[in-house]
Image (tube, helix red, strand yellow):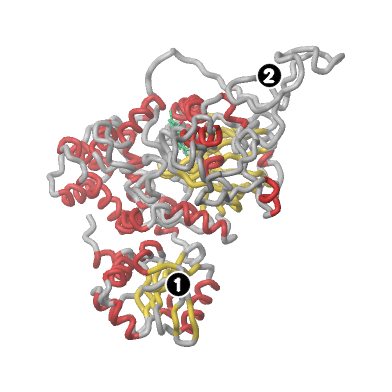
């Protein structure tokens, strides 16, 4: 018999078990004796159709992919729990909010909106913030975003919005980017989009980490207590690490440095036991307050500033376990805004109402069956029972004859009354009357006051980022009339902003668009600014430490311990990845210099022997390392020898540039004041 040049790694079941590994079998349990060679005639002859092992393997592989999500295709996810810290039985009878300390398991998925599943993590985009709570009264899915408002007011416009932002239909590009004609054409024809547009042009749309962004339920929902009393509510997630964003140039460079920047950051933090946490807060208000506001609480393009209705923290989310399998969990998780539990209810927000249909419908297309709820990541963790039966991929084996209700077969002798549960979900009663109309309330008609409030709530530096983002995006728009129409809307938000964008584009400012409602000046809200709420901490932040042959090992160790003592982490970088001889020891780097550019870190340090520094000053990777750190407004901690690299990069010292021993302090922030020196912002 011919012998294979490849030895089988599979062996027989007995051998594999002896090695403590599961033996390979087909999907039908037949042990496989050889996973290296297909069945053929002789050792060089044709492959036989009879080879059921080959055919099954290739057949399964050919069908590995399922349709990616039409939006939010690229996502990163984790398991965790919700802990109730301040029960609210007076507001809601939801069991999840019933007792202090009560924990509810959950699965969270963060996503970009526009790009495909394989696109990069750091484009300018809204981020999805979806949480599935496996409560003991069924699954509650809070499917929100990191921006508290949405582009459109009515679900009927959603396909149009998404078609406009996705890659252009004829060209198939750009991928994962709003900087193109169709997006700006659509939003400039829909003035209601302006509020979300200005958030999307702000630093909120380029988060530093998924762990450092806020989340919002966006819509107004209702809380319902045991007596049936209702209140309006908006849901908020607040990151314990504080908010942080990238600068635009950094986020663009990260797209080359690490496609998976956010996914890796989340995964590594959880793997290291540094579990990301968010506070969960509610903004609760009644009809009287809603009536007193100059905008409609059912309009998803509006926020209620927390200075108007304060936030009450009632719980926290901790993400403490990475998924075991990306496909089974992250890809197959099906979020449904219609998954709601007793004690919470929908409002009449017309965007929310449309979402209640869309998500259930999309799951049938993605997961292929009405039984997608049986997939482990989607199945409730409490018992569930009903008379729904059969369907594609039915994996349950329900027992009994009766598949209808009421019936008197299941529990013989029992009263065959309805089996519904009096404590089950009830819709809060609400008076509704009116004619059937396709119309939008005039109270939805103020499109500029809130974007103006957002603009005025930002620091000067944040305003410059917004204006520059508008210039960048509109400079990618090919058609003048679209650019001009955008400018005509910006003029209604703030004349200064519009002028700066027009100047940045080198174009004349057109006249302001005619507003449906004249904008008013609302009180600015400090809570809307990232920089005003900056958390001075090293927790969650990473320092890139460059060393080389002959570096002082004791100094390196001292700096690493000091950074770790402040909650930060260190990634060591050297020109070579192998074991290096240092002054006083040896050390291996985590990464090689050319593959570890500084956009990957929050701050950088250099501890180098003078002759190594001299050499690196002629290496573009080292010069780029410090140049990028400087223009991305990061702290730079250097030794005396490494000044030669800074000099080569033309870096002048400022309060963020100094001896590495100060880095544990200086790395806690970015140096916004430096920006005017390194970048011409609009
Ligand atoms: Fe949506 C996915 C958030 C409006 C239709 N949406 C999706 C996800 C998030 C959001 C976070 C990803 C969930 C996951 O990780 O799997 N969507 C929002 C927010 C909206 C919003 C905050 C407005 C406030 N969405 C919206 C409307 C519609 C949809 C108005 C349709 C009428 N969204 C979908 C969808 C997706 C989706 C097509 C794609 C995949 C999926 O649902 O499961 O059904």
x 15%, y 43%: residue: 509
Q: Residues within 10 Å of mark 2 (few under 14, many from 20)?
A: few
Which image quadrant is residue 671 in?
A: bottom left
What residue is shown with label 2?
387
Q: Quadrant of the C terminus?
A: bottom left
Q: Can residue 349 be seen from the camera position used here?
A: yes
- Work out whether 413 lies above or below 395: above
x 59%, y 60%: residue: 273
Left or right: 141 as drawn, with respect to 674: right
Q: Earlier in the sequence, mark 1 or mark 2?
A: 2
Which numbered mark, 1 or 2, is in the foreground of this view?
Answer: 1
Indicate the position of residue 79 as horizontal and vertical percent values.
59, 47
The residue lying toward the viewer, choosing from 504 and 230, is 504
Q: Secondary structure at mark 1?
A: loop
Badge number at residue 589: 1
- Work out whether 530 lies above or below 299: below
Indicate the position of residue 472 as horizontal and vertical percent values.
24, 49
Left or right: 128 as drawn, with respect to 369: left
Tag 1 near tag 2, CB within 8 Å: no
Q: Residues within 10 Å of mark 1 (few under 14, many from 20)?
A: many
The residue lying toward the viewer, choosing from 16 and 138, is 16
Indicate the position of residue 495 as horizontal and vertical percent values.
22, 46
Indicate the position of residue 379 as horizontal and vertical percent values.
63, 34
Which image quadrant is residue 601 in?
A: bottom left
Question: How far separated are the C-alphas under marks 1 and 2?
Answer: 60 Å
Badge number at residue 656: none
């Amino acid at each position: 018999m011919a012998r294979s040049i490849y030895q089988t790694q599979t062996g027989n079941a007995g051998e594999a078990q002896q090695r403590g590994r599961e033996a390979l079998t087909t999907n039908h349990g037949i042990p496989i004796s050889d996973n290296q060679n297909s069945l053929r005639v002789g050792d060089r002859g044709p492959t036989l159709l009879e080879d059921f092992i080959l055919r099954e393997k290739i057949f399964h592989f050919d069908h590995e992919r399922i349709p990616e999500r039409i939006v939010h295709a690229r996502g990163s996810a984790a398991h965790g729990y919700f802990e109730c810290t301040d029960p609210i039985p007076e507001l809601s009878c939801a069991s999840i909010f019933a007792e202090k300390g009560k924990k509810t398991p959950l699965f969270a998925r963060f996503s970009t909106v526009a790009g495909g599943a394989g696109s990069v993590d750091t484009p300018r985009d809204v981020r999805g913030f979806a949480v599935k709570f496996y409560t003991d009264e069924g699954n509650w899915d809070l499917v929100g975003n990191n921006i508290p408002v949405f582009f459109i007011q009515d679900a009927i416009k959603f396909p149009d919005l998404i078609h406009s932002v996705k890659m252009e239909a004829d060209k198939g590009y750009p991928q994962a980017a709003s900087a193109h004609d169709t997006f700006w054409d659509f939003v400039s024809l829909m003035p209601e989009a302006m509020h979300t547009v200005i958030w999307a042009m702000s630093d909120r749309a380029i988060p530093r980490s998924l762990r450092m962004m806020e989340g919002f339920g966006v819509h107004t929902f209702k809380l319902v207590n045991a007596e049936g009393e209702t209140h309006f509510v908006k849901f908020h997630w607040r990151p314990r690490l504080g908010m942080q964003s990238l600068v635009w140039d950094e986020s663009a460079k990260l797209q080359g440095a690490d496609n998976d920047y956010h996914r890796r950051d989340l995964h590594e933090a959880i793997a290291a036991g540094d579990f990301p946490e968010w506070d969960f807060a509610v903004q609760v208000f009644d009809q009287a307050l809603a009536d007193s506001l100059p905008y409609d609480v059912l309009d998803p393009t509006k926020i209620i500033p927390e200075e108007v209705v304060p936030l009450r923290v009632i719980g926290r989310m901790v993400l403490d376990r990475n998924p075991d399998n990306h496909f089974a969990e992250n890809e197959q998780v099906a979020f449904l805004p219609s998954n709601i539990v007793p004690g919470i209810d929908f409002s009449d927000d017309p965007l929310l109402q449309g979402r209640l249909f869309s998500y259930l419908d999309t799951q049938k297309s993605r997961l292929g069956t009405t039984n997608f709820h049986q997939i482990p990541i989607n199945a409730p963790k409490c018992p569930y029972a009903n008379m729904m039966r059969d369907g594609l991929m039915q994996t349950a084996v329900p027992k009994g004859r009766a598949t209808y209700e009421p019936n008197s077969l299941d529990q013989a002798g029992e009263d065959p009354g309805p089996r519904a549960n009096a404590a089950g979900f009830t819709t809060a009663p609400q008076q509704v009357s009116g004619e059937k109309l396709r119309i939008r309330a005039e109270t939805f008609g103020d499109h500029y006051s809130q974007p103006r409030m957002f603009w005025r709530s930002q620091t000067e530096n944040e305003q410059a980022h917004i204006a520059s983002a508008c210039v960048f995006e509109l400079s990618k728009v090919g058609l003048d009339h679209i650019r001009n129409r955008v400018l005509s809307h910006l003029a209604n938000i703030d004349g200064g902003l519009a002028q700066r964008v027009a100047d940045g584009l080198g174009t004349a400012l057109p006249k302001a668009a005619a507003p449906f409602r004249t904008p008013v000046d609302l009180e600015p809200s400090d809570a809307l600014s990232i920089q005003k709420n900056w958390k001075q901490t090293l927790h969650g932040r990473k320092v890139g430490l460059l060393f080389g042959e002959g570096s002082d090992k004791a100094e390196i160790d001292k700096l690493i311990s000091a950074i770790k003592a402040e909650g930060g982490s260190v990634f060591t970088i050297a020109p070579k990845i192998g074991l290096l001889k240092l002054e006083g020891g040896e050390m291996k780097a985590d990464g090689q210099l050319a593959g570890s550019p500084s956009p990957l870190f929050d701050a950088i340090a250099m501890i180098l022997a003078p002759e190594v520094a001299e050499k690196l000053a002629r290496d573009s990777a080292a010069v780029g390392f410090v140049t990028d750190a400087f223009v991305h407004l990061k702290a730079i901690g250097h030794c005396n020898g490494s000044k030669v690299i800074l000099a080569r990069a033309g870096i002048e010292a400022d309060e963020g540039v100094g001896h590495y021993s100060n880095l544990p302090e200086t790395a806690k922030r970015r140096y916004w004041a430096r920006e005017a020196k390194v970048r011409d912002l609009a």
